Image: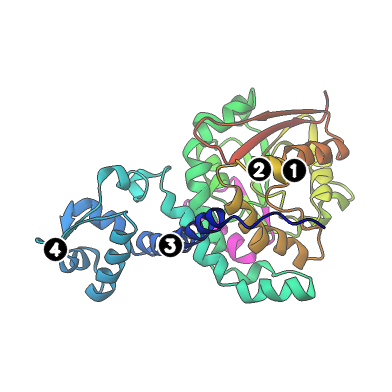
Amino acid sequence: MATSAYDTQRAEAFSGRLLETLNSGALAVMISVGHRTGLFDALAEVDAATSEELAEAAGLHERYVREWLAAMTTGRVVEYEPKAERYRLPPEHASWLTRAASPDNVAVTAQFIPLLATVEDEIVRCFFEGGGVPYERFGRFHEVMAEDSGQTVLSVLFTHILPLVPGAEERLEAGTSLLDLGCGRGRALLALAERFPNSRFLGYDLSSEAISYAQEQAAARELRNVQFRVRDLSTFDADAEPESFELVTTFDAVHDQARPLALLRGIRRTLTDDGVYLMQDIHGSSLVHENIDHPGGTLLYTISCMHCMTVSLAQGGEGLGTLWGEQKARELLAEAGFGSVDVHQLEHDPFNAYYVVRGRV
């Protein structure tokens, strides 16, 4: 078999790209640290500071702060004045890295990188032995997901997402029933329950930790129109007499289920004749070559391998994967018995697609 000639320039360019990748990966870890410790917020507040001043402002140990600042400086995130020994976070950078910048705070998403690395040994084992890594091995995943969805979903829930479903707000104002599946810590449901006291809300999730947190929040806010229950949704299509709901939602939840089609069939059964199912899931294609230019393609396939796919396989599931894509989504929705599917994207969000689904055409 003929082989192509070795291209030295191409090899050198690729080695440079790999070095850049190592630096970027390390920078992502330190951006996560900066977010969790509040360093970006503190530095944005003080405008310019020495490592000692920043450590005092953030309530942290100076030696760690100094080393973090060095990584931020060489990573060209923070500017440094050597003579004054002062560090500064430019406002153009702060607009993407501070809590005040939400929903544009990329530091929230950076947390996924070190989080996924905690299960690397187990993922490597799965490459050799098969199976998967269960939900409970991801210590902070629901915490990070709740913060992430707070930016992508909660920030535009009432202004952009609900209006995608004609008449949804009017139904909720008057009083209706809404079921959220894979609800996690329940932030969307809690917001809806507060906004629409005449309606009834129910959330299911596999994680007992997430459900406990949601229940505590509901109790603290004295919300009596919302309930949260632990449930394995892989058998959601098996209820003898399913409860009926006029509205059903899933936010970034279908693709990591053990049996996505069973979930979708269950939703079809529980939805009233005039009901609407709103599915937010990852925007992309089911074909890998069509995702080469996706702005988050590599990140999403990595999250899939290290979390979404593996937690499904850990349940003996299908391991559909994060980038299951619109083609596969439409295929499964049709197989589940839905008659109408409209797909929307929000201008500010290239990562998610919103499917407005009805039982009848």
Neighbor class of circle 1 (other Cα within 10 Å; few <14, some 14-19, many 20+) is some
Which amino acid, by three-letter code, is at mark 3? Asn
Distance, label 2 to label 3, CA atoms, is 24 Å
For label 3, the residue is 23
The residue positioned 73% from the left and 37% from the top of the image is 326
Distance, label 3 to label 1, CA atoms, is 30 Å
What sort of colour scheme is used for the picture? rainbow
Residues drawn in magenta: 204-226
Which amino acid, by three-letter code, is at mark 4? Glu
N-terminal of the pair, mark 2 or mark 3, is: 3
Distance, label 1 to label 2, CA atoms, is 7 Å
Residue 172 or residue 121, whichever sits in front: 121
Neighbor class of circle 3 (other Cα within 10 Å; few <14, some 14-19, many 20+) is some
For label 4, the residue is 85
**Residue 275: x percent and y percent?**
75, 31
Determine the secondary structure under disc 3. Answer: helix
Q: Quadrant of residue 335?
A: top right
